[in-house]
Image (cartoon, helix red, strand yellow):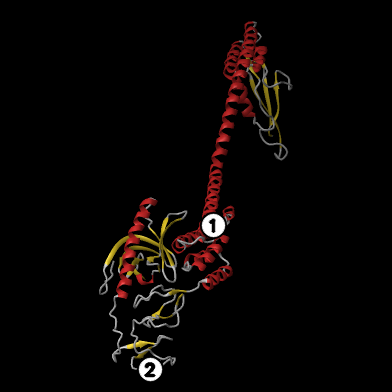
Amino acid sequence: MNYTLSEGEYVLLTDSVVRFDGVVKIVANEVIITNKYIVCEHGTFQRRIERFPINKIQVFQGKPQLFIYQDSFSPYLDICFTNSVEKVRFPNILIPIKAKAHMQLWINALTTAVNTVHREAVMQPQHNNIRNTSFKAPCSKCGFLNDSRNSYCTKCGTSIDKNVGITGNTTRDVIYEGKDGLCPNCGKKVDSFTSYCTSCGFKIQDVSSSMSVKEFIEKYEELITIEDRIHLINSFVVPNTKEDIKEFIILASLYIDHKAYKNNSISEFGVSEKDIIEAWMAKFEQAYQKANWVFSEDSYLKKIEEIYTEKKTSLLHAKEKERKRNNKLQNMPIIIYVSILIILVALFVFWGISHIIENKSENKKDAEQIKVVEELISAGEYEEALEETDLIYDFWTQQKLVIKIQRLLKQEGKAKIPYFSIEDDTYSDIEKKFKDEGFINIKLEKVPDLITGWVHKDGEIIEVIIDGSTVYESGTYISNDVEIIIKYHTFK
């Protein structure tokens, strides 16, 4: 990474391939945690540097607000900054236990960095509480830095205590976390939602967050899309005071409805009502962890635990039902395929058994019919034997007998009248068919009656005379030397 450390800055931890899913959405190729910044290098073609100031990480009761959570995708680390919450994931670490162990390294490094920042702030050089013409004294009312020799503030006119220096504990207007203002101790500007002054380390009092919670819910109800609501939930910072935590926990419990898991509608960005419930539950868990610190000796903690346990249990049951329902839907095609396969196998087995039984019956009938055909052949009644072969089921047995009978008929000078069509066949086609059957006395007779060829065509069949008759049946066996006359039209 092309990053130059500033004076007094040093590296605490280095990492690679880290995804940020909070307000800032990037995939960092390399990350460096120093005592001043979380530095991320990202981009494929054009490398960019993104920095997250360590002094913007929220601190509650001396502890940085760092939490490990698990959603439907993977474990992630929540880093609570003063104006946002960043989700940090590690795509290359697929095993959840290893991912959580890796996150603990981040927590250790960030905790060291936060403690260093606050320690350095508190250890800044302080002025003695004596009158000195060389320093500026902050106004106890507005915080404006006045010349120490002034008796009244040049901005608001409030009387200045000459015996109080920069680190004095004079009572002033209370500056609350959540409002832009000046530090009551040193007079330097304090950003909104800052727990400690970044200049002197003075602890800023918590604002009664009912207003921030109220503003949050009003903003939430104004939003329409699922994506915007999830983003708002993820970026909301859980308040620190007891009353505000109570209010937020009650509010969150109302929005965590396990029935949303029955709603499978997905928006164009790939999120659904279930994702909102997951976001609410993750924020609820943050509030619950903070409540364990704040309500450690309070009877209300039991009530919070009951609400948390009830919501957690109902959500787990809903997830389990959803998982089982999805498994059923996923397994449905397999069940259908297996059912169809079973039916096909059953039909095949049934057909096979039926076929075997039928074959046995047919074999028995064929044996009897073959006996009849053989008896007719022995008696020389070949034509009747040929007709009886039509009753034999087995094709190959039938064809063997037919060929045998046809050979015997030819030996006796018999031939079968072929199948032909006077309308479709030419005289040469019919002549060939008779020759193929073994007839030897075939005559072609021209009838020169055509003049124009409009009514009848040249070569068109007039009639076929077999043994002096035009009435005959194709397939019948007759003597092969009978006279066959084929008459057809031709020109004069």
Which residue type carries mark 1? Ile
Return the residue at label 1: 307
Report crowding for label 1: few under 14, some 14 to 19, many 20 or more residues within 10 A (C-alpha). Answer: some
Q: Position of residue 80 (x, y in %)?
A: 42, 66
Q: Nearer the viewer, mark 1 or mark 2?
A: 2
Q: Is residue 398 above or below residue 71?
A: above
Please state if 102 lies on the left or on the right of 302 as rendered: left
| Quadrant in the picture for residue 168 | bottom left
Image position, residue 356 (x, y; %) = 59, 19
Residue that mark 2 sits on: 151
Determine the CA span between mark 1 and mark 2: 56 Å
Could you say which is closer to the camera, residue 90 or residue 455? 90
Mark 2 is surrounded, within 10 Å at the Cα level, by few (under 14), some (14 to 19) or many (20 or more) other residues, namely some
For the N terminus, the image quarter is bottom left
Res 364 quadrant in image: top right
Label 1: element kind: helix
Q: Residue at x 53, y 62 (%)?
A: 249
Amino acid beneath label 2? Ser
Disc on the earlier residue, 1 or 2: 2
Q: Residue at x 58, y 35 (%)?
A: 340
Instruction: State the image coordinates of residue 72 (x, y, percent, origin top left).
Output: 47, 53
Q: Mark 1 touching mark 2, by CB under 8 A?
A: no
Q: Quadrant of the C terminus?
A: top right
Closer to us: 16 or 424: 16
Residue 371 vs residue 272: left or right?
Answer: right
Residue 66 visible in the displayed image: yes
How many numbered tags mark residues here? 2
The outermost residue toward the top is 379
Residue 463 on image: x %, y %: 71, 27
